[in-house]
Image (cartoon, rainbow, N blue to C red):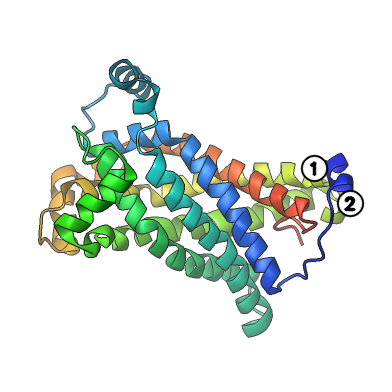
Amino acid sequence: MAAIEKVLPKPKIEPYSGKYFVACGLGGIVACGPTHTAVTPLDLVKCRRQVDSKLYSSNVGAWKTIYRAEGLRGVFFGWSPTFVGYCFQGGGKYGFYEVFKYAYGERMFPNANQTVVFLAASASAEFLADLALCPFEAIKVRMQTTLPPFAPTLRAGWSKVVSEEGYAGLYKGLYPLWARQIPYTMVKFATFETTVNKIYEFLGKPKSSYSGLQQTGVSFLGGYIAGVGCAVVSHPADVMVSKLNSDRKAGEGAGKAIGRIYSNIGFAGLWNGLPVRILMIGTLTAFQWLIYDSFKVGLGLPTTGGH
């Protein structure tokens, strides 16, 4: 990384300028789209076990069953809506987080508690990012949780939903998606920023005294710790998103559907698939922060946190 830093040109991107926020958004796209797509096999099995806990006896058994029947393509089924959706979501989440963190912490409430600023900025960013994610998440979940599949591709799934339910059908899981993603992102960003600060305090030297490689190593560790918290906090809503997209009846209101589903699965059912989600989200979050901060270092920008 140190050698790369010497070779790469250093664009003069003024912190908190329009170019800075666009760069952060691009970093979010690079960090989120590929990483979410890479864990599609985990996500596929998690979603199916959330909807039907008796479908597979174990995660490994599930992958073996799917691979024998459908090959590698079956194991990565649903990758296309995952990639497109999380590119949009990642760009919005990271880009708007930097916008709102600056607006709330520097312009509007300069004396506010830092953690409160992190929480408010991440919640605001995720609220907007989910508007872009929701249609693709709805199609992904339907593709992955229905057997035989609801649709074979993103394009076919989009056309089918719109023709049968209109564009509103793409957003019928928006409220539970917000319920899952906003707490998730609040924990992700606030815990990450706080953890990174604590790591540098423990190391006993200012962040600026470490190389880009060392700083991104701190980002990876802070990201994994934050990811475990994210997975636990958001898991019940994640289960409900899967259930709503696969089992919501035509014309049924969100509140009524949630009540009906909860009466069927109970409190324990909200935690189906948690271990695999902790593995998935912990690893995912760690690599997202590593990629995002490496992208920023490549542009001559500081890594996140530890200021």
Callout 2: SS: helix
Q: Secondary structure at mark 1?
A: helix
Disc 1 target residue: 214
Q: Residue at x 81, y 47 (%)?
A: 212
Q: Which image quadrant is residue 24 in? A: bottom right
Is there a contact, CB below 8 Å, between mark 2 and mark 1?
Answer: no
Crowding near the residue tagged with mark 2, few <14, some 14–19, many ≥20 C-alpha atoms within 10 Å? few
Q: Which of 23/42 is in front?
A: 23
| Residue 237 visible in this rendered orientation of the protein | no
Callout 1: 10 Å neighbours few (<14), some, many (20+)? some
User: Which residue does the image show at 53% across and 41% down from the upper left?
Assistant: 35
Quadrant of the image containing the C terminus: bottom right
The part of the image, by quadrant, that contains residue 18 is bottom right
Provide residue 70's location: percent of width, then percent of height: 31, 21
Q: Is residue 221 depicted above or below 249 in this figure?
A: above
Q: Is residue 151 left or right of residue 82?
A: left
> From the viewer's perspective, is residue 58 above or below residue 97?
above
Query: Residue 209, labelled with which disc?
Result: 2
Question: Which residue is found at the position 42% from the left and 35% from the top?
Answer: 40
Front-lying residue, 57 or 171: 171
* Position in image of residue 86 (x %, y %): 46, 51
146 or 231, nearer to the observer? 146
Q: Give the label on residue 53, or none.
A: none
Which of pointers 2 and 1 lies earlier in the amino acid sequence? 2
